[in-house]
Amino acid sequence: MQNVTHISADFAISPQITTAQLAQLKAAGFTTVICNRPDHEEGGQPTFAEIKAAAEAAGLDAHHIPIRPGQATEADVAAFDTAVTTAKGKVLAYCRSGARAQSLYAARPR
Protein backbone atom coordinates (compact mmCIF):
# COMPACT_ATOMS: atom_id res chain seq x y z
CA MET A 1 0.00 0.00 0.00
CA GLN A 2 1.32 3.44 -0.87
CA ASN A 3 1.98 6.15 1.70
CA VAL A 4 2.64 3.72 4.56
CA THR A 5 5.72 4.70 6.55
CA HIS A 6 7.14 2.01 8.83
CA ILE A 7 8.37 3.48 12.11
CA SER A 8 9.29 0.05 13.51
CA ALA A 9 8.82 -3.58 12.48
CA ASP A 10 5.36 -3.63 14.07
CA PHE A 11 4.19 -0.02 13.72
CA ALA A 12 3.47 2.20 10.72
CA ILE A 13 1.72 5.48 9.98
CA SER A 14 -0.15 6.80 6.99
CA PRO A 15 -2.39 9.58 5.81
CA GLN A 16 -6.15 8.99 5.69
CA ILE A 17 -7.10 5.48 4.59
CA THR A 18 -10.23 4.34 2.78
CA THR A 19 -12.51 1.45 3.63
CA ALA A 20 -11.31 -0.32 0.48
CA GLN A 21 -7.71 -0.31 1.75
CA LEU A 22 -8.47 -2.30 4.90
CA ALA A 23 -8.33 -5.67 3.11
CA GLN A 24 -4.94 -4.62 1.68
CA LEU A 25 -3.72 -3.80 5.17
CA LYS A 26 -4.83 -7.21 6.43
CA ALA A 27 -3.06 -8.88 3.49
CA ALA A 28 0.09 -6.89 4.37
CA GLY A 29 0.06 -8.39 7.87
CA PHE A 30 -1.55 -5.61 9.88
CA THR A 31 -3.90 -6.64 12.68
CA THR A 32 -4.91 -3.24 14.07
CA VAL A 33 -5.72 0.24 12.80
CA ILE A 34 -5.85 3.37 14.93
CA CYS A 35 -7.67 6.44 13.66
CA ASN A 36 -6.40 9.73 15.10
CA ARG A 37 -8.83 11.96 13.20
CA PRO A 38 -12.03 13.42 14.57
CA ASP A 39 -15.03 12.62 12.37
CA HIS A 40 -15.93 15.37 9.87
CA GLU A 41 -12.53 17.04 10.15
CA GLU A 42 -12.54 17.36 6.38
CA GLY A 43 -15.20 16.88 3.71
CA GLY A 44 -15.28 13.43 2.10
CA GLN A 45 -13.40 11.76 4.94
CA PRO A 46 -14.88 8.38 5.93
CA THR A 47 -16.29 8.36 9.46
CA PHE A 48 -14.72 6.13 12.05
CA ALA A 49 -17.91 4.02 12.11
CA GLU A 50 -17.38 3.29 8.39
CA ILE A 51 -13.70 2.46 8.94
CA LYS A 52 -14.48 0.27 11.96
CA ALA A 53 -17.16 -1.72 10.12
CA ALA A 54 -14.84 -2.34 7.15
CA ALA A 55 -11.91 -3.14 9.47
CA GLU A 56 -13.93 -5.70 11.39
CA ALA A 57 -15.20 -7.23 8.12
CA ALA A 58 -11.55 -7.59 7.05
CA GLY A 59 -10.57 -9.16 10.39
CA LEU A 60 -8.81 -6.12 11.84
CA ASP A 61 -9.19 -4.43 15.22
CA ALA A 62 -9.96 -0.71 15.04
CA HIS A 63 -9.49 2.04 17.64
CA HIS A 64 -10.59 5.67 17.54
CA ILE A 65 -8.39 8.12 19.43
CA PRO A 66 -9.32 11.42 17.77
CA ILE A 67 -6.86 14.25 18.25
CA ARG A 68 -7.05 17.82 17.05
CA PRO A 69 -3.61 18.94 15.80
CA GLY A 70 -1.41 19.98 18.71
CA GLN A 71 -4.01 19.08 21.35
CA ALA A 72 -3.08 15.56 22.49
CA THR A 73 -3.52 15.02 26.22
CA GLU A 74 -1.76 12.57 28.53
CA ALA A 75 -4.95 10.48 28.42
CA ASP A 76 -4.77 10.40 24.61
CA VAL A 77 -1.14 9.23 24.73
CA ALA A 78 -2.04 6.57 27.32
CA ALA A 79 -4.98 5.30 25.21
CA PHE A 80 -2.75 5.21 22.13
CA ASP A 81 -0.03 3.34 24.03
CA THR A 82 -2.56 0.79 25.27
CA ALA A 83 -3.90 0.23 21.75
CA VAL A 84 -0.37 -0.28 20.40
CA THR A 85 0.93 -2.49 23.21
CA THR A 86 -2.14 -4.74 23.33
CA ALA A 87 -2.30 -5.28 19.56
CA LYS A 88 -1.73 -8.84 18.47
CA GLY A 89 0.44 -7.90 15.50
CA LYS A 90 1.34 -4.99 13.24
CA VAL A 91 -0.39 -1.64 13.85
CA LEU A 92 -1.19 1.12 11.38
CA ALA A 93 -2.12 4.50 12.85
CA TYR A 94 -3.41 7.24 10.59
CA CYS A 95 -4.63 10.82 10.52
CA ARG A 96 -4.81 13.43 7.76
CA SER A 97 -1.08 13.34 7.03
CA GLY A 98 0.32 10.81 9.51
CA ALA A 99 1.93 13.49 11.71
CA ARG A 100 -0.43 13.16 14.68
CA ALA A 101 -0.07 9.39 14.62
CA GLN A 102 3.71 9.68 14.58
CA SER A 103 3.66 12.27 17.39
CA LEU A 104 1.51 10.04 19.58
CA TYR A 105 3.83 7.10 18.96
CA ALA A 106 6.87 9.21 19.88
CA ALA A 107 5.16 10.50 23.06
CA ARG A 108 4.57 7.00 24.43
CA PRO A 109 6.49 6.01 27.57
CA ARG A 110 9.60 4.00 26.79
Image (spheres, grey):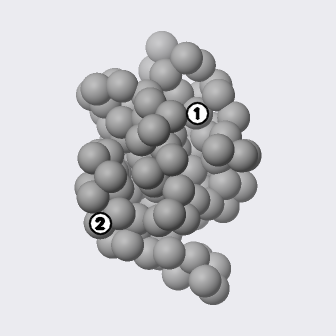
Element under disc 2: helix
| Residue 77 percent location from the top left of the image | 44, 39
| Residue 75 percent location from the top left of the image | 36, 45
* Viewer can see residue 70: no
Identify which amino acid the numbered label 2 is placed on.
Answer: Ala
Element under disc 1: strand
Q: Which residue lies furthest to the top in this view?
A: 110
What residue sits right under mark 1 in the picture?
12
**Residue in the image at 42% along x and 41% along y:** 26
**Residue in the image at 72% along x and 46% along y:** 3
Tell me which corner region of the image, top left, top right, bottom left or bottom right, holds residue 107. top right
Which mark is in front, 1 or 2? 2
Tell me which corner region of the image, top left, top right, bottom left or bottom right, holds residue 18. bottom right
| Residue 53 percent location from the top left of the image | 29, 66
| Mark pair 1, 2: CA separation | 21 Å
Q: Earlier in the sequence, mark 1 or mark 2?
A: 1
Query: Observer-nearest residue: 68 or 96?
Result: 96
Q: Residue 53 carries which label?
A: 2
Callout 1 crowding tier (Cα within 10 Å): few <14, some 14–19, many ≥20: many
| Residue 19 percent location from the top left of the image | 47, 65
Quarter that holds the N terminus: top right
Callout 2 crowding tier (Cα within 10 Å): few <14, some 14–19, many ≥20: some
Tell me which corner region of the image, top left, top right, bottom left or bottom right, holds residue 80. top left
Q: Is residue 64 left or right of residue 12?
A: left
Identify which amino acid the numbered label 1 is placed on.
Answer: Ala
**Residue in the image at 33% along x and 72% along y:** 49
* Viewer can see residue 106: yes
